[in-house]
Image (cartoon, grey):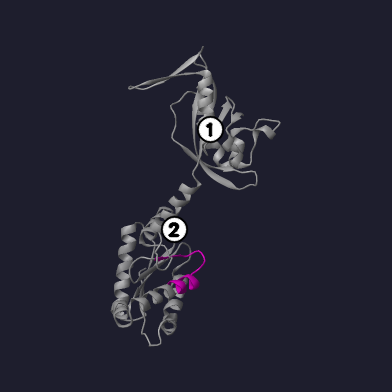
Amino acid sequence: MGMIIIGGSYMSLELTGIEISNLYKLISEDTTDIILKTDRHGFIQHASLAMDMLGVSQSDMLVCPHILDLVRDRFKPAIDAAHRAAIDGQPTRPWVEAPLVTEDGSEQWHAIRMRSLTDDHGEVYGVLSVMRNIEEARSLRESLFAAELTDSLTGLTNRRAFISMLQHLLDQQSDGWLAVFDIRYFKAINMRYGLSAGDQFLEAFASLLRTLSDSDSIVSRIGAQRFSILLPEGGQDRMRSICKEIISTLAGLSKSISPARLSITASVGITPIEQSLDSTMKALELALFRARIKGSNCIEITA
């Protein structure tokens, strides 16, 4: 009787072919992982019961599907490369993430790993694949990533995201412009009217920036009372026009926040996106410094 030995340094497990079959059934019937056996060309020869969760039942098909039929076109090269590597006998690769297409056209993200199948003579005759559903994990990961890049109060991107996006524009040699708004005497507003009123103002100001900025602008909160606008395309005149419209509207915001009359103003620094992150930020800080010296609602531009 044929026998397979599964062993490590501490113990070995001897299994017959029938026992291996029963072990496979025990594992495959009690897991959401999809286990596939494909031939050397990638055609599916067998699939575990979890395959039905995709709305794909192999028993209903007249022709065996190909493993690449399960994924979108843009992910087929990665899956094909992993399958070829297994056929070539290369070491087991890391998990490959890709969305599997369900019968109704929707997607379910899975992590996929493959390993070659060999006969008694060591010849590769197919590939064994494990496809693990990672929808929940991926959703959690994306939520955590979004939280890391988002200001929780205003919903704008935060300073970390702002720096990354600015660096991206620098790498793309963008001819865009950057503006930063510094709310004047914001701490005094908090002390006089309370943190709640201050938060309401920041939320309203963030909404104002979104509304008055161009659709392709990137708006961020980069400090307690500092906000930025990245304009990837558009010249100095367009950026100045946007900023003038924003600061001229500030006075009206105070009326919607508190019955008391709040004197809310801002200083604005504007600079072109230069050759490096450091030089751009230095030019921006210099423009903002000059605007603050000149007084409320002033705009300074570095050429």
Element at label 1: helix
Outermost residue, top side = 1
Q: Name the residue under label 1.
A: 28
The total of numbered circles placed on residues is 2
Q: Alpha carbon of mark 2 to alpha carbon of mark 1: how far? A: 53 Å
Report the magenta residues as a range: 206-220
In the image, taking residue 264 as reference, residue 28 lies left or right, namely right
In the image, what residue type sits under mark 2?
A: Ser
172 above or below 26? Answer: below
User: In the image, residue 169 lies at what x, y percent?
Assistant: 42, 57
- Residue at left offset 48%, top offset 51%: 139
Element at label 2: loop
Q: How crowded is mark 1: few (under 14 residues within 10 Å), some or many (20 or more)?
A: some
- Residue at left offset 46%, top offset 62%: 232
Q: Do the residues labelled 2 and 1 touch (CB within 8 Å)?
A: no
Q: Earlier in the sequence, mark 2 or mark 1?
A: 1
Q: The C terminus is located in which quarter? A: bottom left
Q: Name the residue under label 2.
A: 174
Q: Is residue 211 magenta?
A: yes
